[in-house]
Image (cartoon, helix red, strand yellow):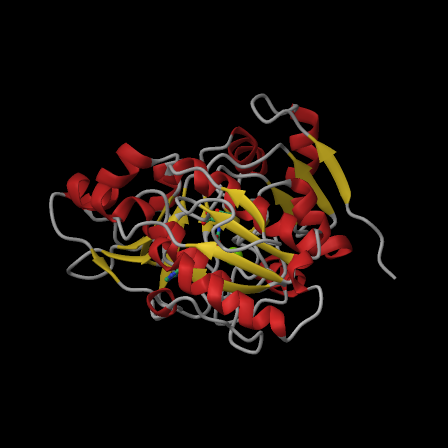
């Protein structure tokens, strides 16, 4: 049915110019190309070519209401895509770009509507990955790129995740190692009176507040924030899912290990051999504390290291046929906010 994409293995630090040129040509021809960024792999197309951007939505199976982020190589290039560039954009760009933060500003008419999903604003960032930067520069155009996975699946942090998710829906994949940050960029909206974080990321709200010297709001567009509060809980696969593995996911707070253990025992009474496919990702809970038969993995107790491993663990669980995944929530602290957000989304 489907053939594999062409995979070009590039040096992540010093990408070979002829390989970058091949990918840049594909972008300019209107194709979609997957490439590494420091956060996750992106599925890129020429942001100025609406037909090419439509190819991203088609390859991902992504609904048209979901805007895509535009990747640029300089702040000047970003300024050319917006109608207003406030001082706070300069502050963020100067201290955090290239890096995992996306700024939302009023879009210039030259940015095709399909990029912003019809919204009056556009999200822009300079990625901190040599391969991504080389590709943008070689193409000489801004590159629209969501994460390089089918809609609602876990984002890819390695080229093989891209190939497994998209297969022949993408023609060309630049394979440049694993992503250092591991989860998607922080999205900050600077269009209103008060800056608003629309998606938490490893650039934390505290960091943005101290950088800007004032309060930054938080408003998630797609997740109510409810799910994490009432764990342990089960989430039927019928709910809207995002960043979601195929396994059923239960979230729990560190102090809830004992009640989770009881819930697991009653579940196992009704199922045969369920334990063989149950895995946990722990932080502070002791291995074994959820009961025998749970394949316990201990994750790093530091947010940056945890983020780097999270999606690989979720992909691994899917590949291993894990049916029930028990995820220990990290502390309710700003430094962990993005990870709590992704774990909550994984449980929907
Ligand atoms: O780290 C990342 O941001 C990765 C890599 C590839 O750069 N990209 C990524 O893109 O995660 P994507 O398309 O999966 O994320 C798009 C999200 C939207 O769901 C929305 O939350 C926000 O970014 N966004 C983008 N453009 C926006 C806009 N014009 N207004 C409001 N939110 C926007
Ligand atoms: Mg995505």
Q: Is residue 150 left or right of residue 215?
A: right
Q: Is residue 73 visible?
A: no
**Residue at position x 27%, y 33% in the image:** 95
**Residue at position x 58%, y 35% in the image:** 178
Report the front residue among 96 and 323.
323
Instruction: Find residue 67 and report its horizontal and vertical position in percent.
Output: 46, 63
Q: Is residue 321 above or below residue 158?
A: below
Furthest-bottom residue in view? 238
Q: Is residue 265 above or below residue 171?
A: below
Instruction: Find residue 223 and report its horizontal and vertical position in percent.
Output: 38, 68
State the image quarter where residue 213 is shown: top left
Q: Is residue 96 visible?
A: yes
Which quarter of the figure is the N terminus placed in? bottom right
Furthest-left residue in view? 214
**Residue at position x 36%, y 53% in the image:** 254
Instruction: Find residue 152 and report its horizontal and vertical position in percent.
Output: 56, 64
Instruction: Find residue 5 and report its horizontal and vertical position in percent.
Output: 78, 47
**Residue at position x 47%, y 66% in the image:** 262
Q: Is residue 293 left or right of residue 105?
A: right
Q: Is residue 159 above or below residue 58?
A: above
Q: How many marks?
A: 0
Report the front residue among 122 and 218.
218
Furthest-top residue in view? 14
């Amino acid at each position: 049915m489907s053939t594999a994409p062409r995979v070009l293995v590039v040096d992540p630090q010093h990408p070979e110019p002829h390989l970058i040129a091949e990918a840049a040509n594909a972008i300019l021809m209107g194709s979609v190309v997957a490439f590494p960024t420091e956060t996750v792999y992106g599925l890129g197309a020429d942001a100025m070519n609406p037909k090419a951007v439509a190819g991203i939505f088609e390859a991902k199976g992504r609904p048209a209401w979901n805007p895509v982020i535009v990747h640029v190589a300089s702040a000047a290039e970003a300024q050319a895509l917006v109608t207003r560039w406030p001082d706070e954009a300069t502050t963020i760009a100067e201290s955090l770009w290239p890096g995992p933060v996306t700024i939302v500003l009023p879009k210039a008419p030259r940015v095709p509507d399909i990029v912003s999903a019809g919204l009056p604003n556009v999200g822009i960032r300079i990625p901190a990955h040599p391969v991504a930067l080389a590709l943008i520069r070689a193409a000489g155009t801004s590159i629209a790129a969501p994460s390089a996975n089918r809609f609602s699946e876990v984002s890819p942090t390695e080229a093989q995740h891209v190939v497994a998710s998209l297969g022949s829906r993408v023609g060309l994949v630049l394979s440049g190692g694993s992503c250092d940050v591991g989860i998607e960029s922080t999205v900050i909206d600077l269009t209103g009176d008060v800056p608003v974080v629309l998606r938490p990321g490893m650039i934390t709200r505290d960091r943005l507040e101290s950088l800007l010297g004032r309060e930054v709001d938080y408003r998630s567009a797609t997740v109510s924030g409810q799910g994490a509060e009432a764990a342990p809980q089960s989430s039927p696969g019928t709910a809207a899912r995002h960043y979601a593995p195929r396994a059923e996911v239960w979230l729990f707070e560190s102090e809830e290990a004992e009640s989770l253990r009881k819930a697991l025992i009653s579940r196992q009474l009704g199922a045969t051999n369920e334990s063989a496919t149950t895995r946990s990702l722990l932080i502070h809970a002791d291995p074994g504390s959820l009961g025998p038969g749970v394949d316990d993995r201990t994750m790093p107790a530091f947010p940056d290291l945890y983020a780097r491993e999270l999606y690989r663990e979720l992909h691994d669980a899917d590949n291993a046929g894990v049916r029930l995944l028990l995820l220990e929530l990290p502390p309710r602290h700003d430094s962990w906010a993005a990870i709590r957000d992704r774990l909550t989304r994984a449980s929907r």
